[in-house]
Amino acid sequence: MLMIIWMIVTSAAMVKRMSIALALLLLQASSVNAFLCLPLPGAQQRHVLSQLTAAIATRTGKSNKAAAAVTYTPTPNYGDTQGAELYLDGVAVAAGATSLVSGVSWKINKGERVGIVGGNGAGKSTMLSVIAGYNMPEEGTVTVHPRATLGYLVQTAVSGSTRTLKEEAMSQMTAFHDAEAAVARAEARANVDPSDSNLLALERAQALWVEAGGEDVTQRVENILSGLGFQRTDYTRPCTDFSGGWQMRIALARLLLGEPSLLLLDEPTNHLDSAAKDWLMHFLTSYTGTVLLVSHEEELLRAFQCTTVAELRFQALELYRCGYDQFLEQRKERAEALEAAAARQAKERARVQGFIDRFGAKATMASAANSRKLKLEKMSIIEGPQAAVKRPHLRFPVPPKVMPELLKLRNASFGYPPAAPLVEKVDFTLTRGTRMVLLGPNGCGKSTVLKALTGTLPPLETGSSDRILGEGLEMGVFTQDLAQDLPQDQVAVDYVLATVRQKDMSITDQQARGALGALGLMGEKAMRPISALSGGEKARVALSVFALLPHNLLVLDEPSNHLDIGTTETLSEALAEFRGTMVVISHNKAFVEKLKVTHVGLIRNRRLIVEERMLRPSDWAFDTQSGGSGGASKAIVKSCSGKGGSKANDGKQDAAVADGGKANYKDQRARFKKMSAAPKRIAKLQVIIEEKEQKVEEYGKKMYHAGSDVAKVIEFSERKEALAVEVEALYAEWDELEAMLAEKNGQ
């Protein structure tokens, strides 16, 4: 007997009422050969489906695929939005048994630019997934305008896609592909029968193709791919060749090229370098559709030019019809006004209660006392603003003792054959107390250097190169994908405990809970499966391991990704206080500037250049340069250590540093003259550099204010880059003069 079970699930409440046990009983009692489910959005429904499908497989002895024909396509709920682009009516959202937000009624009109903010685990990503149809609300409805097209940056990126980069990026350009197919069909008909009607149909199809952007489609694709950091040589590479971070960029390019009228972006800058972040900021300022942006980056939220800021806090959503800076001011003003109103009411209630207590027992005043008592009972209590959520706390253990030289790389080249090496001839010693940041655009080899330091990527020439570890080295490694690579089925506190006990069996359950609690994962959250945590909460789980195990070397690759503003500040403060050695990659300027950096590592022409100095504004101009895979230079990499150390030069070598015995009299005199004038020249250089760096910042601001004026943005960008090059040259001159003075003083 063939029985087909049709299930139409319309609400989460219905799912909760469904009895899996009853369904399984029906399956056991019936000869069920097919199971069809239409539609099934939401994690809970998919869980029900998987159990029922497994039951069929068990009973029939067939695989799940053979036993069940399943159709699951997450789609938004299109319908009457009362004129808005998006309408949320009485929506409640939860993560498992934990309520995240409730009572949300919100209309988002066409063209609005909404910044969604809140701490890790507040429900921002869950809210976007509910709007996109990937999950269902616990209560209420989410409705999208029938004529809207919705685009959502899915966090699984393009994993498993067999297309090339360009094919995948263009895969959601539906209007263009439909128009192109229509032109092909019309051309085929006109070639067979060149009648007036067929030629007119071809003309109409071509006009629709032009309207769909067919004439400039190549330029649009190249603009977006190059803006996100891809080279033309990447266009024909299969998506499987790219790492997880680059696959996220492919997904972002695919989404932007699809040009949806309703764009949902969840932390789009997590895997972008400074250049790609700047490009995305400018792109979003000129985007004409409705955009909902979840981000922890204040710089992006400011550049985004929000028309509305929606804050998820204390299980409620509060709207501010203004930009991000105004939101910060208004939030403070609202809290102060609410606190004042609550204090006034409390004072009034105390006064009324005092009257009731004094005169309630007197016959002559009983009527007045009862009247006031009734007034007090009917008075709606004004609750003051809830106390701010306690900021996470993190402190790294005291580093174990280690030899002065922690790690050496000698004559080592690294890369991924058969491609050319990303970094060549690395000669580098990491000494105790070094606090180094590696800068450069994505693709230049920063993460490759980190993998080389940690030993996860062996050198290409194993016979002639060395990686030497210092005695007592205890290395802790935090990669940008570590939080996503955690075992999703394990409970958070169990994972932390199991991981730290591999090195220290004395760590107790209470200590593991304490580390998680200090990072904001208290009570029930510490007992959740890792899969039920947000991206930022997963990162906190990984960080709690660092808080329990002592290391004398921390290697960190984009550690602030996925973290909210408060946790990012906590991490930067903990790293600033850390007394060990660390190497950090980060494109987050505000984060890096708090780390008390002692060394800056730059990768130029496949060479690692390490300079002992503090950060400069021009370093961030270098960080935004594109490229990094240029031809290899034969220059020797130099590591600077101390004022008397050699400084690595990118361009010209100073011709006046020849040995005194070989230099002629004229060269010696010119050098002496330059050395004598060095103090005055350095003072002048300070003034010039400060002025030029101010102009660099001004051009950066002008680029943001230029908005959709592409010509102005390009003009300001070129001027900014030219100034940055000038500043770099001035710093090089300063370094040279300092070295001369050190030599003169016998240092």
Image (cartoon, helix red, strand yellow):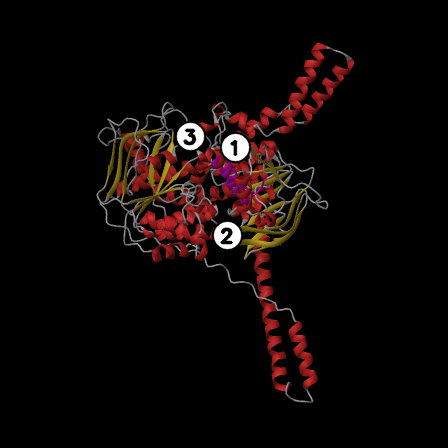
Q: Residue at x 42, y 37 (%)?
A: 728
* Sequence order check, earlier mark of 3 and 2: 2
Q: Mark 1, mark 2: which one is toward the viewer? A: 1
Amino acid identity at mark 1: Ala
The total of numbered circles placed on residues is 3
Q: Nearer the viewer, residue 636 or 373?
A: 373
Q: Is residue 439 left or right of residue 3?
A: left
Q: Which residue is mark 2?
A: 119
The three-letter code of the residue at mark 3 reads Gly
Residue 722, given in percent of the width and then of the height, sits at: 49, 34
User: Residue 87: x and y, percent?
Assistant: 67, 47
Against 284, residue 358 (above or below) is below
- Specify the principal SS of the magenta part: helix
Compare residues 340 and 11 and report the one nearer the observer: 11
Residue at 45 percent of width and 30 percent of height: 242
Q: Which of pointers 1 and 2 lies earlier in the amino acid sequence? A: 1
Q: How far apart in space, not on screen, are marks 3 and 2 (Cα)?
A: 35 Å
Residue 54 shown in magenta: yes
Q: Whole-percent x and y of residue 443?
A: 42, 32
Which residue bears the numbered disc 1?
A: 67
Q: Residue furthest bottom?
A: 363
Bounds of the magenta segment: 40-58
Per the image, label 1 sits on a secondary structure element best described as helix
